[in-house]
Amino acid sequence: MSGIKDLGNATLTFDGKSIELPVFEGSERERAVDIRALRKETGMITYDPGFVNTGCCQSDITYIDGEKGILRYRGYDINELAENCEFIDVAYLLVHGALPNETQHGEFSRHLNSHSLLHEDMRHFFDAYPDHAHPMATLSAMAVSLSTFYPELEDATIQENIDYKVSRLLSKLRTAAAFSYKKSIGHPIVYPKRSLKYCENFLNMMFWNPVNDYAPDPVVAKALNKLLILHADHEQNCSASVVKMVGSAGANLYASISAGICALWGPLHGGANQHVIEMLERIIAEDKGNVKRVIERAKDKEDPFRLMGVGHRVYKSYDPRAKVAKQMCKDVLAKLGVSDPLLDLAMELEDAVLADDYFAERCLYPNIDFYTGLTYRAMGIPTNMFTVMFAIGRIPGWIAQWLEMREDPDGRIGRPRQIYTGPTLRSMNS
């Protein structure tokens, strides 16, 4: 892959034996030791819980520098993309490697519109779920069910019409998400409209009904575009790794995306934005909004309370996405005339966190989840749909990662090793 620089070898010496391990450098000067021959040459493996020091691939999709707070898609800074692009342009960028020109943008938009309907038989699936079913469970089931209605996309060797695959998943899962919400509140399903753009269409499917005059607010649609862009990809995170792990076994794209949705559902991953809102509500109800007490609880090792939306596995400085999300949240609430005590509490909490050496010393700063839930809440999107919104945004990143994995000449089925700590050989007769 382009961008790789050979840096020679590193020498590993143990038990009187030395081996040479290749060292190489990526385009942003990230260095890696190639340990593929380690077990063959020494009989040893590496031990790395959570794979935090293990590179599973070479990739030219997304670059993150957690220490400097940098996030780029295909070389473009996340702030520039969020400010100047539509979500579908960023989806195109992630999958194709370049932003679309005017003609490509128009063609991709038409693809999204023409593939936005679900097969009518799939509507019956929604009737089988209870009203209280979590939308993430429904979305995951719908993703894998698409393979039975559109099996022609299962052929992983057909690469000439990637837009066809991308537009089907992006459009149909957006429609499925809106349908699941309508089912949960007992409202009639709203079909997508050809006259509306991607984000406006989703908002219309969510909030239009026969007895109101709903029209997507341009400010809200712009904010949704930005939110989806901020979530579009994030390198080799948990859900992307799951998508690639499933795909490495030869599973089709639908099954891989369905698995990624399930991984994203976890409260330590995509579910965190929902937990931020629930935490803020508890702080008001139980701690009467006392920020000083909340900060003390967060620093108390004996207290099980955790400050959700603060700290990140990768970022050791301010999450660059959080800066965009914070300003966008303020803009949306101001435009809609919403006064939200949770936002006031969140801003007070953020100031307290940034002013406290305890959090700075541990590189704990507000992350994107701290503000996205508040924005979705202002839009009228219910809490249990927050992670669904995250999933819709992340679909193009998952697809790009899956395609890259399938084309990787070094790709192999994912199969981590372990250090066995159980009993040695035993006999049932002893």
Image (cartoon, rainbow, N blue to C red):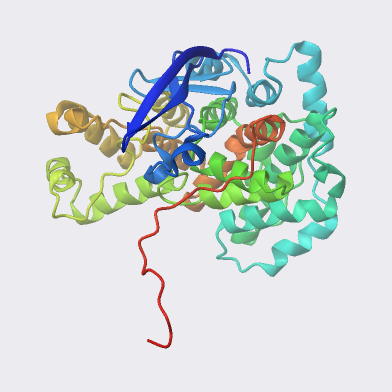
Residue 239 drawn at (x, y percent): 53, 43
Q: Which residue is at the far right?
A: 152
Q: Which residue is at the far front?
A: 16
Residue 231 drawn at (x, y percent): 52, 32
Left-right relation of 165 to 184:
right
Residue 291 drawn at (x, y percent): 17, 41
Quadrant the N terminus occupies: top right
Left-right relation of 207 to 192:
left
Q: Nearer the viewer, residue 169 or 127?
A: 169
Residue 135 drawn at (x, y percent): 58, 55
Quadrant the C terminus occupies: bottom left
Q: Please tell me which residue is depicted at 68% across the width and 15% down the height of the picture.
A: 98
- Specify the quadrant of the image occupied by residue 186: bottom right
Q: Please tell me which residue is depicted at 80% across the width and 49% down the height of the picture.
A: 118
Query: Image height check: is 94 above or below 377?
Result: above
Residue 205 appears in the rendering: no
Q: Which residue is at the far bottom?
A: 429
- Specify the quadrant of the image occupied by residue 148: bottom right
Q: Nearer the viewer, residue 216 or 362?
A: 362
Residue 101 appears in the rendering: yes
Q: Nearer the viewer, residue 332 or 301?
A: 301
Q: Please tell me which residue is depicted at 63% across the width and 45% down the height of the picture.
A: 413
Query: Image height check: is 10 above or below 211?
Result: above
Left-right relation of 182 to 365:
right
The number of numbered discs placed on residues in the rendered structure image is 0
Left-right relation of 259 to 35:
right
